[in-house]
Image (cartoon, rainbow, N blue to C red):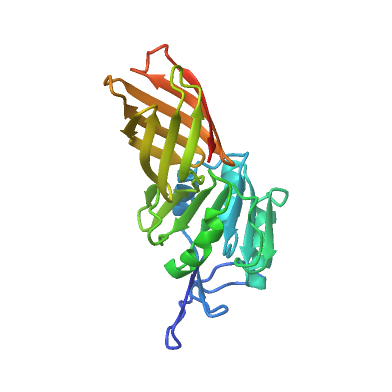
Amino acid sequence: MALWLLMGAGAQAQTTKFGDEIYQPIRGQMGRDVMWMPTAQDHVMNLLNAAKVTASDRVYDLGAGDGIIPIVAATQFGAKSVGIEYNLKLVELARRNAQRANVGDKVSFVHGDIFVEDFSQATVVTLYLLPELNFQLRPTLLKMKPGTRVVSNEFDMSDWQPDLFIQSERAKGYLWIVPAEVAGTWILQGLAGVTNTTLHLSQRFQKIGGHITLGQEQLTLLGAELSGDRLSLHFVDGKQVTHSLKARVSGGVMEGELLAGDLNSSTNQPIKGRLR
């Protein structure tokens, strides 16, 4: 994982040595209008821990540099991982580093452009880019499967607020969970004794709000939350009974459960919904 920064003509590269006997990249070296910066291993661990990486994940590192993120994802978390890197010499170095770490079967590196290569199969995406590059990638990231975790070293995603802030000793990072698209009016089925139930949701990334209509009652949603494809919300009906809806959303279909009263209530009702 490396930082790609626009660099003025008068900037001076540092001379700290990285790499091996074949190729030693220099911290701050120029690439295609950018420069390379490595990430400390303790921060790498913090970023991957925040994303809750497991052996079932497929991690894609955009701007893989010398390969530390994909390699640590494989050695410490057992994940399959792919690094995409524009600098061919760094790609070759990363491949050698993966072989030295005995994870050549779990890690691969692609010589390519992160704005061109396909990383749609990722369950975790890591990156270390300037905010404007994050912003350019944002539409692609938001189209990924809901629940995909996106981790950025140092820089945010403008008005897409992170789900988690990550702090290391000398670095910071951000975690986002790609949200499902839930905005609109949902027709709900399964509420006993209620013939007309609609759920209207507004959405700004993972932030949601709205109201639910039960027959003739229109009730404001309380504590509505969206994490990936998991929806959670509460409302109080005209009898002052609190209801909690927990559901999963996929392709305009909602399936979940409505709980009335406290968490020990036995009045749980299976709920199904479709987006109008």
Residue 228 rendering spot, x and y as whole percentages: 50, 42
Observer-nearest of 88 and 256: 256
Q: Which residue lies furthest to the left in this view?
A: 240
In the rendered image, the vertical position of residue 171 relative to residue 21, given as above or below: above
The image quarter in which residue 90 lies: bottom right
In the rendered image, the vertical position of residue 245 relative to residue 96, given as above or below: above
Q: In this view, does 88 lie to the left or right of 198?
A: right
Q: In this view, does 171 lie to the left or right of 82?
A: left
Q: Which residue lies furthest to the top in this view?
A: 266
Residue 259 rendering spot, x and y as whole percentages: 41, 20
Q: Is residue 32 left or right of residue 191?
A: right
Q: Is residue 200 left or right of residue 274?
A: left
Residue 91 rendering spot, x and y as whole percentages: 66, 66
Residue 105 rendering spot, x and y as whole percentages: 73, 49
The image quarter in which residue 258 lies: top left
Count of all numbered marks drawn on residues in the image: 0
Q: Determine the residue positioned at 48% across, 53% down.
A: 151
Q: Determine the residue positioned at 58% across, 57% down.
A: 61
Q: Determine the residue positioned at 52% across, 54% down.
A: 142
